[in-house]
Image: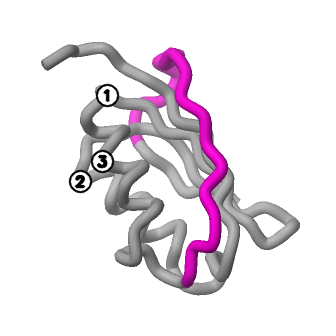
Amino acid sequence: MTDETVRLTARVTGVVQGVGFRYWTARKADELGVKGTVRNSHDGSVELVAEGDVSGVSDFTSWLHSTRTPGRVENVDFEVSAATGEFDDFRISD
């Protein structure tokens, strides 16, 4: 096991606004010990940035791709990079 932290930057498309997606994404992040932010975009997608250990971010990414998310996720565009350490918790942004 490594204590390396990574950053996930993702854009989620589909039916992901008005269905509790941000709320449940924040709850899942808290459960996995992932810190960051999630917000609705003007184009109907949801954008998020999440940082945590490799295992937590990997589990979070798997959850985003699963059928357990609220609404209907059609696609998750994402990239993983080095963490910046800028987050203290996981927040829902307007």
- Mark 2 or mark 3, earlier in chain: 2
- Mark 2 or mark 1, earlier in chain: 2
Q: Which disc, if any, is residue 75?
A: none
Q: Position of residue 69 (x, y in %)?
A: 43, 74
The quadrant in which residue 43 appears is bottom right
- Mark 3 or mark 1, earlier in chain: 1
Farthest-out residue, left: 1
Residue 76 is inside the magenta segment: yes
Q: Position of residue 20 (x, y in %)?
A: 51, 79
Q: Which disc, if any, is residue 31?
A: 2
Q: Position of residue 10 (x, y in %)?
A: 62, 46
- Look at the image and give the residue range highlighted in magenta: 72-89
| Residues at circles 3 and 1 in contact by the CB criterion of under 8 Å | no
Asked if 44 appears above or below 79 in the picture, the reply is below
Tell me which residue sits at (52%, 73%) in the image: 21
In this figure, which residue is indicated by the disc labeled 1? 54
Could you tell me how far apart the alpha carbons at marks 3 and 1 are, in whole angstroms?
Answer: 9 Å
- Indicate the amino acid at tag 2: Glu
- Indicate the amino acid at tag 3: Asp
Tell me which residue sits at (28%, 39%) in the image: 56
Left or right of 22? Residue 31 is left
What secondary structure is found at the residue carrying circle 3?
A: helix
Mark 2 or mark 3, whichever is nearer to me: 3
Tell me which residue sits at (25%, 34%) in the image: 55
In this figure, which residue is indicated by the disc labeled 3? 59
Could you tell me how far apart the alpha carbons at marks 2 and 1 are, in whole angstroms?
Answer: 15 Å
Give the main secondary structure of the magenta stretch: strand
